[in-house]
Amino acid sequence: MNLIANSRFKFFPQFNDFDRPEWLSSRQKLQPQFADEYFNSDSLQDKFLQGIATDRLLPVKEVLESFELFGRVRKCVRRPVVADLCCGHGLLGILFAMFERDVEHVILIDRNEPLSRQKLIAIASRIAPWVADKIDNRVADVKISSDWIEPDIAVVSAHACGVLSDLCIDVAIKTGGPIAILPCCYPRSACVAPLALQTQFGIEAAFDIDRTYRLEAAGYRVRWGSIPQEITPMNRILYGSHRG
Ligand SMILES: C[S@@+](CC[C@H](N)C(=O)[O-])C[C@H]1O[C@@H](n2cnc3c(N)ncnc32)[C@H](O)[C@@H]1O
C-alpha cells in the first residue's frame, strides 16, 4: 500500500516535468550558474536565491525543501511569532521573516549552529532589511520547559529527526498555536502506533497516523500534505491548527 503522496512544485513551477530530476535532490551546493539559469528574475525570492548561490551556502536539496515546505504551509501557520525548531541553517524560519508581513518575530533554535545560519541571516537581511529585526537566533536544546514558549506561537520544522518531530508536537500543543512539520527518520523502537498500523501501512505512515491522532485529541484539525518527492522521499507534511 503506497501511502507516500507526491505533489507538483509550487514555489518553483519551472521544476515540474524537469529533465534533470536528479539535480532536485542534489547535495551539491547551489551554484551561481544554476541561479543564473533558474532564478534570474528581480523578484525577492530570486534575489535571495542568487545570494545563497553566490556564497555557495546550501545544497540544492535543502534550498528546494525549505522553499517548497514554506510555500505550502505559510498561510495556515503564520502568526506574529513563529518558531523554527531544530532549524539547522534556519532557512525555513528566515522565509517566514522575509515573506510574511504578519510575522513579527521568528525564533530560530537548534542545539548546533552551522556557519551557514549567520551567513543566511546576513544575506536575507541585505536583500530584505526587515528580516534582521525579526530574527531571534538561539543555540540551545528545544525543551518543553523552554522559557520562550508562549501561547499561540506557530511551530514549524523541516526534518526534525525521529522523536524530535514529536517534541515539536509537544511544544505546539503547549502553545496551542498552529504547527507544520516535515518529519524524517522514523525509528521503529520509538513507534507507539498500534502494531496493526505498523504492519499494514509501514512504520512511517503508522508514526504519522499516531501523531495525527495525538494532535486531534489535543484539539487540532490536522491535514497531510507533501512536497515533491523529487526533492526527498521524506516528503510528508503534517500541519494543523487548533480548533479553538
Ligand atoms: C536533520 S537536521 C534538520 C535541520 C534543518 N531543519 C534542515 O531543514 O536542514 C536536525 C537538526 O536537529 C538538531 N537537534 C538535534 N537534537 C536537538 C535538540 N534536542 N534540540 C535542538 N536541536 C536539536 C540538530 O543539531 C540538527 O541541526
Image: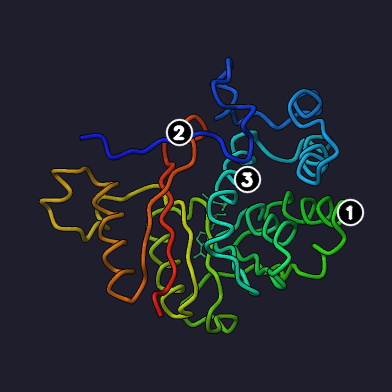
Residue 67 locus on image (x, y percent):
62, 45
Query: Decide: marks 3, 1 in contact (CB < 8 A)?
Result: no
Q: Name the residue under label 3.
A: 67
Q: Which residue is drawn at the image coordinates 25% and 56% (left, top)? A: 191
Question: The C terminus is located in which quarter?
Answer: bottom left
Left/right placement of residue 196 relative to residue 78 reads left
Above-or-below relation of 121 to 143: above
Residue 240 locus on image (x, y percent):
42, 64
The amino acid type, in three-letter code, at marker 1 is Arg
Mark 1: secondary structure: helix
Above-or-below relation of 164 to 175: above
The amino acid type, in three-letter code, at marker 3 is Phe
Q: Which residue is drawn at the image coordinates 38% and 64% (left, top)? A: 166
Q: Mark 1 points at which residue?
A: 126
Write down which quadrant ligand 1 falls in.
bottom right
Q: Choose top left, top right, bottom left or bottom right for residue 102.
A: bottom right
The amino acid type, in three-letter code, at marker 2 is Gln
Q: Choose top left, top right, bottom left or bottom right for residue 108.
A: bottom right
Left/right placement of residue 15 relative to residue 119 reads left
Left/right placement of residue 37 relative to residue 177 reads right
Label 3, label 2: how many angstroms apart (C-alpha)? Answer: 14 Å
Q: Mark 2 points at which residue?
A: 229
Residue 111 locus on image (x, y percent):
58, 64
Query: Decide: marks 3, 2 in contact (CB < 8 A)?
Result: no
Compare marks 3 and 2 and give the one earlier in the sequence: 3
